[in-house]
Amino acid sequence: MILSCSNIDKTFVDNHVIKNASFHIEDYEKAAIVGINGAGKTTLLKIIVGELPADSGLVTFAKDKSFGYLAQHQAVDSENTLFDELLTVKQEVLDLESAIRQCELDMKNANENTLELLLKKYTSLTHRFEDINGYAYKSEITGILKGLGFAENEFGKKVATLSGGQKTRIALGKLLLQKPDLIMLDEPTNHLDLNSIAWLETYLLNYKGAVIIVSHDRYFLDKIATKIIELDNGILSSFKGNYSDYALQKEHLRTEQMNAYLNQQREIKHQEAVIDKLKQFNREKSIRRAESREKMLDKIDRLEKPVEVNADMKLKLTPHQTSGNDVIQIQELSKSFGQNKLFEHVSFELKRGEHVAIIGDNGTGKTTLLKIINELIPADTGEIKLGANVEIGYYDQEHHVLHMDKTLFDEISDDYPYLTNTEIRNTLAAFLFTGEDVFKKISALSGGERGRVSLAKLMLSEANFLILDEPTNHLDITSKEILESALNAYEGTVLYVSHDRYFINKTASRILELTHQEFVNYIGNYDYYLEKREILTPVSVLEAAAADEPSAQKLDWKQQKETQAQARKKENDLKKCEARIEELEQKSASLDTEMAKPENATNSAKLQELSKEKETVCNELEQLYEKWEALSE
């Protein structure tokens, strides 16, 4: 065991954030802390690392174990370059390297008396240098910087010139290089693109130490976590498995709790009815029995009704009218900012009812495309045609559709003047803004609260074509699930940009990947995209990666469907082949057992029959092994 937390308690004024929480982390365990925004996840991490005192309780680390902590926001200010800043972590390696060079120089000029001592020192220094992987420290730094999304031509940039998100990535890189026995990460994926998140997943999965993660990225948690630690209304509970396992266990637990509550309520009502009936008899014995039952009823430990977090938040997206079948057609669209060419000759179309996710690295132009469609910025070339009766509803990740100087109430009433005061309040209450909250200024709201106001406006728009830019940013897991359910029930068309792979998996029926200044189309969700991107990526795109030139070829939809159909057939053939191999291998083992039996070993006719059958099985297996190998290729 590397960490033990016993009976941790923390209150801020009248907010009892953590109530008598206990858990432990084993060596090499990968744990995630989950809960709604404000549940106390970051507070718990700060108590563990000693940045905040607990009101009571004990945090204990195993002896001689180190830990590292990455907060959500990092104040990394340095005049160092990116590479040199990470190099500061390798000071021991640098000192050893310098000492080894000095020792080599000393040995050249040493006499017989000192040479033996210098050789021993040299052996000791080089042994330690090898132990801490000294010969690979430069490639290690390069690998981490590239993994976190920095290009080699950025390694010479000054850290002081970076954005807040980039500085957090540098802090994460330094922490990973330190290789503590326990890493604690607070929302590590917030400032990473999809490729960097995938790299971090692999890194943490192979990490030779324990990890505690606070994250709303459910796909990330599914890949990494072996234990989920939930904070719910101050109560801490532990669940084995990843996020999906936890969600399933949580749902079963909640169902059991609800059933227990309902059963108890039925029993209470039954007893109350019996008591009333006994009293109505108005006889001495019946009254005594009624009083006895009342005493028993008073002693029952009454269960509280389980309350689902954010159960009051309601999101129903209903189009005002149905659009035509052709929702949008984009032809030969191009956009550059100065010398920075984002994309060119982009063409695609959306049909009514499609839910399409746009993915790609940071800075490739995904948000720019959405802004062009919404006429917020012009395209350089190309044409956009909207279909019949198309009404757009736009969700902007920077919330430019909101007016910072207005109150929540005015934000809704000014855009929808036909709504009554009661209707406006009911709408805001559906997104958890009640009482005096409705008179708060938009500028005073958190990112998550602004997201909820934008969603409220989106719901009221009754649009039939939703364009969403990072809709899950700043939303906690429960709010994301509410949005997912609403989008899956939505009968209109959806085009969105997102880095949330779990969200994409749940809501997308098609993916457009913006890569090397063009779009590649995948018909399926995120898991399907991962599975098929190597098959469906056109040769021209692969060439573009090497030549840094835009591809001349594009896969059209029909070609991709044919490719996908062929791939599915190969998959089915492979599964059938594997099943037959397993069946025959079991048959072969069974025949070996039969031939080894004494009664068969002395029966030449039976033995010959079994041997012939064995030979047939072996021949078919040989053919199947070859077929399996070909299909696997």
Image: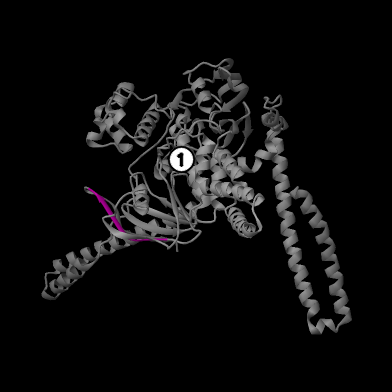
Q: Nearer the viewer, residue 336 or 118?
A: 118
Work out whether residue 203 can be spotted: yes
Q: Nearer the viewer, residue 191 or 261?
A: 191
Q: Is residue 124 magenta?
A: no
Q: Considering only vertical position in the picture, is 153 above or below 565?
A: above
Judging by the rendered image, the residue that carries numbered circle 1 is 484
Left or right of 243 in this view: 146? right
Determine crowd level at label 1: few under 14, some 14-19, many 20+ residues with C-alpha closer than 10 A: some
Helix, strand or loop for disc 1: helix
Where, by quadrant of the figure, is residue 19 drawn? bottom left
Q: Nearer the viewer, residue 50 or 352?
A: 50
Work out whether residue 193 can be spotted: no
Colour mapping used in the image: one colour
Q: How many marks?
A: 1
Q: Considering only vertical position in the picture, is 76 above or below 295?
A: above
Q: Determine the residue positioned at 39% across, 24% down.
A: 401
Left or right of 315 in this view: 594? right
Magenta range: 3-12
Amino acid on which the number 1 mark rests in the picture: Glu
Q: In the image, residue 484 lies at what x, y percent?
A: 46, 40
Q: In the image, residue 469 lies at what x, y percent?
A: 47, 30
Left or right of 629 in this view: 392? left
Q: Is residue 6 magenta?
A: yes
Q: Considering only vertical position in the picture, is 570 above or below 360?
A: below
Q: Quadrant of the N terminus?
A: bottom left
Our reading of the magenta stretch's main secondary structure is strand
Q: Determine the residue positioned at 33% across, 22% down.
A: 415
Q: In the image, residue 17 lies at what x, y percent?
A: 29, 51
Q: In the image, residue 460 lies at what x, y percent?
A: 37, 28
Left or right of 236 in this view: 494? right
